[in-house]
Image (spheres, helix red, strand yellow):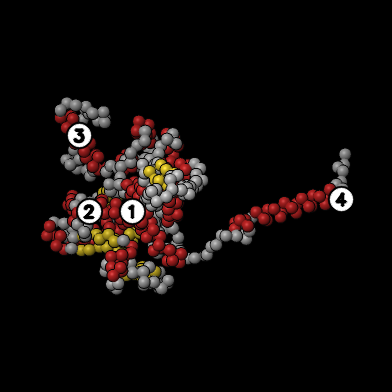
Amino acid sequence: MASKKPTRDQLELALKSAQKELAVTHLRAFESAKESRRTENWYTRNGGPNADIRTAWRLLTQRHQDLVDSNPWASRAVRVITNNWVGDGIIGSPVGASKRYDQAWNDWADTVDCDHAGLLNWYGLQALIARTTAVRGSCLIRRHIDERMIDQGLVPLRLQVLEPDMLDFSRDDGSRIKFGKQYDREGRLEGYYIRQTHPGETEWNGVKIQSELVPASEILHTYEVNRPGQAIGVPFGSAVLLHLRDIDDIASAMLLKAKIAACFTAFVYSNESGESAAIPALTETLEPGAIEVLPDGKQITFANPPVAPDYVEHQKYHLHAVAAGYGITFEALTGILSDVNFSSGRMGWIEFHRQIAAWRWNLTIPQVMDPVHRWFNDAARLAQVRGPRRMIWTPPRRELIDPAKEIASLIEGVKAGFMSLSEVQRSLGFIPAEVMKELSQDIADARAKGLALSVDGASSQPAVSVEDADVEAP
């Protein structure tokens, strides 16, 4: 049976419907790029990777430093980042190094002789570098060669940690010199204009600060690179400075309201008249337990401002934003664990450690650890010590959330060949060569005393210490 042809009215209705649908689709396409009621107060500029930072860096840094010094949440966020980022230190294991080189590295890293200021060892300097990068956006490390250290049996290398303010920002043409960093015509870094003193220590008394051009080979500049061509970093909390300020303001207002409410004051109305009625002058402040006598015709009226609803939930909202801005979890920032269960807490912790791993392997390892290792090798040659070109870096120990399940999972992963035993040991913060050396010695001691350890799968064979073996420890 032939289908019935649509009428003219039906065709016109279908056409109008299609035109309307096309118009709606066009309206929604890239709606945020259109001039509309929702975007009428949205002002933007297409600034380069350094143009926006150039106008905002000083105030961003000053305000973030102020909040870290005075705001408990900003201080806590930076502490959480630093403690998880480097913790008690990222440990280096030279690949194929001699015992003399190993000893020279440990003697340098474990003592304060590596610090130009003589206050921190290598692992303490790592924490200082990470904290400075988080608070002020970037950090400078300057190399110093002190040949007097050779007479003490040490590699003559000292590291001086500097705040980014030591860059001479007045030397900036927006092209070959940016934020006191000089580049060649091909865009490669040539050197840094370093001030003789920190501007915050001298600018207040009008002293003109001199700067000198230091070759790029003598300075390391570490910061998080978010845009190609970016020449300096911004504080980690830049996106949440206003949230932190709002938290302070709201908390101060609520505290003041509570203090006023605690000042129970009695007011006495006097009906006496004449000169015999000695009415004292009214005070302009409230004190707990005060009694005020009011003269005739005087009345006290207190303002009754509206109460901000859900103060706790409002603060939680701001703290969630602060945690997100810093790249950490709400639970790590506040210590509040009542709103999570084991699974959700573990998921948050895993995501947090992904961020930590990104800072370690994309920022700290290539910008600080590997270059410092090259500096150490250069200085070690002056002390007649030859070292390897490669270093394996082991992050700080990661605490297991559910040791029974996680250890069993790691064991199965090694048995299945998904990961190596050394990889597992490094993920837990242990140096594989040291673990194997200590383990072989423990097994040998246990056998000598007639004991059998469960890890000793060949207890019938005499154990051999790594130090006595001909093969190199893994």
Question: In which quadrant of the rendered view does residue 416 lie?
Answer: top left
Look at the image and tell me in which quarter the C terminus lies.
top left
Q: CA distance from mark 1 to mark 2?
A: 21 Å
Q: Residue at x 22, y 55 (%)?
A: 387
Mark nearer the N terminus (1 vs 2): 1
Look at the image and tell me in which quarter the N terminus lies.
top right
Q: Position of residue 473 (x, y in %)?
A: 23, 43
Q: CA distance from mark 4 to mark 1?
A: 76 Å
291, above or below 226, in the image:
above
Q: Residue at x 42, y 43 (%)?
A: 268
Q: Residues within 10 Å of mark 4 (few under 14, many from 20)?
A: few
Q: Residue at x 19, y 57 (%)?
A: 118
Q: CA distance from mark 3 to mark 1?
A: 48 Å
Q: Residue furthest left?
A: 151
Q: Nearer the viewer, residue 262 or 167?
A: 262
Is residue 329 rendered to the left or right of residue 200? right
Q: Residue at x 41, y 42 (%)?
A: 266
Residue with the mark numbered 1: 69
Q: Are marks 3 and 4 in contact (CB under 8 Å)?
A: no
Mark nearer the N terminus (4 vs 1): 4
Residue with the mark numbered 3: 442
